[in-house]
Image (cartoon, rainbow, N blue to C red):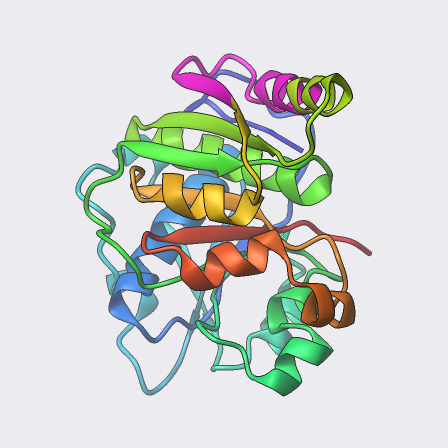
Amino acid sequence: MIAVNDAGSTPTTESHGPCLVGHISDETAARRGAMVAHAMATVRDTELLLAESTTTPPADDVQLPADHRDAYSQSATAVAGASDVEPAVDQRNPSALVMERESRPSLLSGLRGTDAERLADRTDVLTVDNRGDVETLASILVPIAGGRHSQLAVETARAIAAANDAAIDLFHVVETEGAASRERGEQILATASTALGEFENVDTWLYEADSAADAIIEQSEYYDLTVMGAPTVGPLERFVFGSTSTDVQQDADSSVVVAHAHSP
């Protein structure tokens, strides 16, 4: 999944469709979304598209954070768009979509699944929020549990870190005691670390706690950004039993980018 152009250290190994930024109304979320999209478009060596609404300022007027490196900034093409980005996804066939996340989904949307989950049937989706400081980005927490969503989270964190000279901490929580659980956690961390390629400013952390969600929420306070995979269970099961990713999205004080990997 990871493909880096001249701004990185790993040669591009596959062709990607464009990176599309949906209409984001909140200024802080829009700046964070632009930062994520510019980094991903550069790393994937692909076109950057900005969906524009006739009721808001042009998307290419959104200012990138001060720490964002010029090498990870792309010239962008504006495309017609509105609050509903789905038609642009159908027309442009992006490899990644960056969109604003609902802060507190309604009961009905929680049962049906979010827009990001629906759109992940067609493309990778990265959701951003409006929490925290968008100017400074020196450290990124990446909680991982294995699977395709965590894989996309690692790729996204690597792109953001490279664009901002930030450090990455790969974080896996072991909730069950025993050597087998620790061994599995160490393997998950090793796989994620390998996926980062030659990226050097990274550390791994195997953490034991009763609740993965509580551990991630607590540790996220010490980082500028958290990037994590989307829930791995369906809407109904998530509604009944809860989800680590959903709990972190709702209760973390700092900003969280959530990665929904494409699942055709």
Kindly tell me whether residue 64 is visible in this rendering: yes
Q: Position of residue 147 (x, y in %)?
A: 73, 38
Q: Which residues are magenta?
A: 187-205
The correct choice, above or below, for 137 with respect to 188 in the image is below
13 sits to left or right of 104:
right
- Asked whether 189 falls inside the magenta stretch, the response is yes
User: In which quadrant of the rendered image does the N terminus lie?
Assistant: top right
Q: Nearer the viewer, residue 149 or 215?
A: 215
The correct choice, above or below, for 221 with respect to 70 in the image is below
Kindly tell me whether residue 45 is visible in this rendering: no
User: In which quadrant of the rendered image does the C terminus lie?
Assistant: bottom right
What residue lies at 17% left-to-right and 42% top-to-bottom? 66
Q: Position of residue 224 (x, y in %)?
A: 29, 41
The correct choice, above or below, for 36 with respect to 105 in the image is above
The quarter of the picture where residue 118 lies is bottom right
Q: Nearer the viewer, residue 36 or 170?
A: 170
183 sits to left or right of 201:
right
Q: Position of residue 167 (x, y in %)?
A: 35, 25
What residue lies at 61% left-to-right and 66% top-to-bottom? 116
Q: Nearer the viewer, residue 251 or 100?
A: 251
- Asked whether 169 falls inside the magenta stretch, the response is no
The quarter of the picture where residue 197 lies is top right
Q: Position of residue 97 (x, y in %)?
A: 56, 58
141 sits to left or right of 187:
left
Q: Nearer the viewer, residue 94 or 133?
A: 133
What residue lies at 54% left-to-right and 35% top-to-bottom? 209
